[in-house]
Image (cartoon, grey):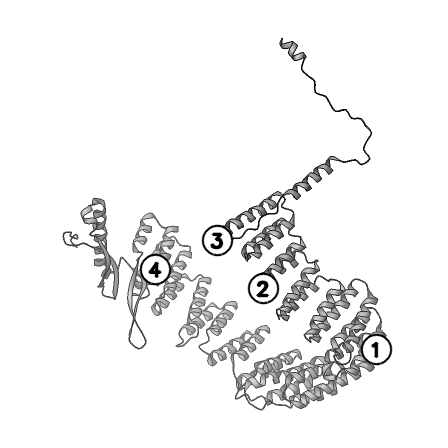
Amino acid sequence: MASTAAGKQRIPKVAKVKNKAPAEIQITAEQLLREAKERELELLPPPPKQKITDKEELNDYKLRKRKAFEDNIRKNRTVISNWIKYAQWEESLEEVQRSRSIYERALDVEHRNVTLWLKYAEMEMKNRQINHARNIWDRAITILPRANQFWYKYTYMEEMLGNPAGCRQVFERWMEWEPEEQAWHSYINFELRYKEVDKALKNWIKYARFEERHGYIAHSRKVYERAVEFFGEDHIEENLFVAFAKFEETQKEFERARVIYKYSLDRIPKQEAQELFKHYTMFEKKFGDRRGIEDVIVSKRRFQYEEEVKANPHNYDAWFDYLRLVENDADPDTVRDVYERAIANIPPIQEKRHWRRYIYLWINYALYEELEVKDPERTRQVYQACLDLIPHKKFTFAKIWLLYAQFEIRQKSLQAARKTMGMAIGKCPKNKLLKGYIELELQLREFDRCRKLYEKYLEFSPENCTTWIKFAELETILGDSERARAIFELAIGQPRLDMPEVLWKSYIDFEIEQEEYENTRNLYKRLLQRTQHVKVWISSAKFELSVEDPERLQRCRQVFEEANKSLRNCEQKEERLLLLESWRDFEREFGSDATIERVRKLLPEKVKKRRKLTAEDGSDAGWEEYYDYIFPEDAANQPNRKLLAMVKLWKKQQIEEDAPETSHQLLLFDVLWSDGVGQRDDRLLLCVPGQRLPHV
């Protein structure tokens, strides 16, 4: 029955296609989908207008929008328009910090996108964040220096802000990249707007040199010609013509360069054309009729110098320039005439500072006669005239005396040189003269004369320790150690010395070099009788250690012992500490455990103290803290140290017992008591009634 029923089921009829030919208009699947999507959008109703009435709704709206923007960015980070829309939306809400953060994130993704930098900077400028905008422009032109939009916008911003100096600085940075012609014109127009013709001129020159550097010679020449026409005769400038002429000179167009120089010299006032004239002179010296042009140039410059020295005869710098000019081009008679006129202008005041520059006129005069003219007799006359002119009773110049003596030696007139130096020492003895005379005799190997000069020197200046040392060194070099020792003995016996410590050290070093160790020990003893300085004690100990002797360690240790005893009463406790530290270092290197422990026990304890301050008017200025050193050997400190030790022991016992009923009763505070020297602060543990300190 079931099968019969199933067999009787009706089969649905399928529609038959009557015309199977292709349709005239073919419709693709993509078109169907697109049309369906468009109809879907048409069917969607417009979003309702939402009115935000409170802060919570606003925050919810912001959250939804930010989520949508972030989702779009997450889908495709490289679509910069999504970043810009997001940042502009945040900017519209006055969320400048958020907008700035979005731009920075976008720059991390694509830092070479010009639009992104421009939008970022415009956002900062709209919100008047000038320094932020400057920072963005700086970053942009550093990363993309060939993007001209950044430079134009940056310079425009600075100019609109009224900052021409900053704008000029940006232009200068831009020009270093050698941009196209329009950029140079922008810079030039900027300078002209602010009437900075000189700076605009520099830009023309830079432009022309840029063309020349890249091989466009004709273009470079046209730039120079346009610059000359542009500035005209009202703003004519010598630097432009100098650059133009140098350009023609490098192109071997010497006639063009000459015409440019002459044209400019005819139109620029002479007082404003010094640099131009200088370059023209150099050009003519290279390529022109040298003799004729140099005569003209020298005459012109000589006229200028004549005007200067006529206006101020005591302007010695002008005389020097004038003399340098005539020495190069004039004959000896003319040069002598100028020198004579120059040295005739004696300083009006007899003070050495006014004569220093003037004396060099005489020195140059003498050197000119000796080296250029090679006339020794006139050179000698110049030196003698100069020495006769100087007021030696008030001051002198050792340089003149020494130069005169050296000149006589070059002329092989040793007697005259010695006579000159003898006159110098007799008229005006001074350290530089005596030292120079001694060096002169040393070079001649006249050691007996050196001895006599040292004696004169020490009569003149017995307190000069350097002279004593040099005298002794001379005798040492000559092998006469007894004379050297006698000189040192005389030196240390002087009542007044400028550097006695240097003298004593030299004497001790001398005895050590002579290997006279007993004499060295005696010297240290004599020195320690005069001073108890800790460095002397340490030096003495190091000396004993350096002597190759079986007892050297014992001797060194003995020195430290004596030094420690001697410095017990020293007020400078830091010096005593320095001695003990040196002793400790010595024992660590050469001593035993027992000696090291012994020195360690001598080291002081560092204690913080307070002392009362008094102002200059005698009023109380409060208290100050300082550090003092308590040495175990000081007898005055023994009771205090014992008290402190007992207190520390008692405190340790209390902590170990850990008594709850007494732990809260311990009180730490400052107690002042006198130790015989001053007031001292120490920390003591006191207890309330019911607790007892150990007996002290």
Asked if disc 2 and disc 4 are in contact, CB closer than 8 Å, the reply is no
For disc 3, the marked residue is 55
**How much space separates mark 2 and mark 1, taking CA atoms?**
51 Å
Question: Which of labels 3 and 2 is toward the front?
Answer: 3
* Amino acid tagged 3: Lys
Q: Amino acid at mark 2?
A: Ile
Q: Which sits earlier in the primary sequence, circle 3 or circle 2?
A: 3
Could you say which is closer to the camera, residue 663 or residue 615? 663
Badge 2 or badge 4: first in the primary sequence: 2
For disc 2, the marked residue is 130
How many angstroms separate mark 3 from mark 2 (CA)?
Answer: 31 Å
SS class of the residue under badge 4?
helix
Q: Which mark is residue 577?
A: 4
Q: Residues within 10 Å of mark 4 (few under 14, many from 20)?
A: some
Foreground mark, 1 or 4, reads 1
Q: What element does badge 2 sit on? A: helix
- Mark 2 and mark 1 in contact? Answer it, CB < 8 Å: no
Left or right: 688 with respect to 555?
Answer: left
Depth-wise, is mark 3 or mark 4 nearer the camera?
A: 3
- What residue is pinned by disc 1? 259
User: Is 14 placed left or right of 633 in the picture?
Assistant: right
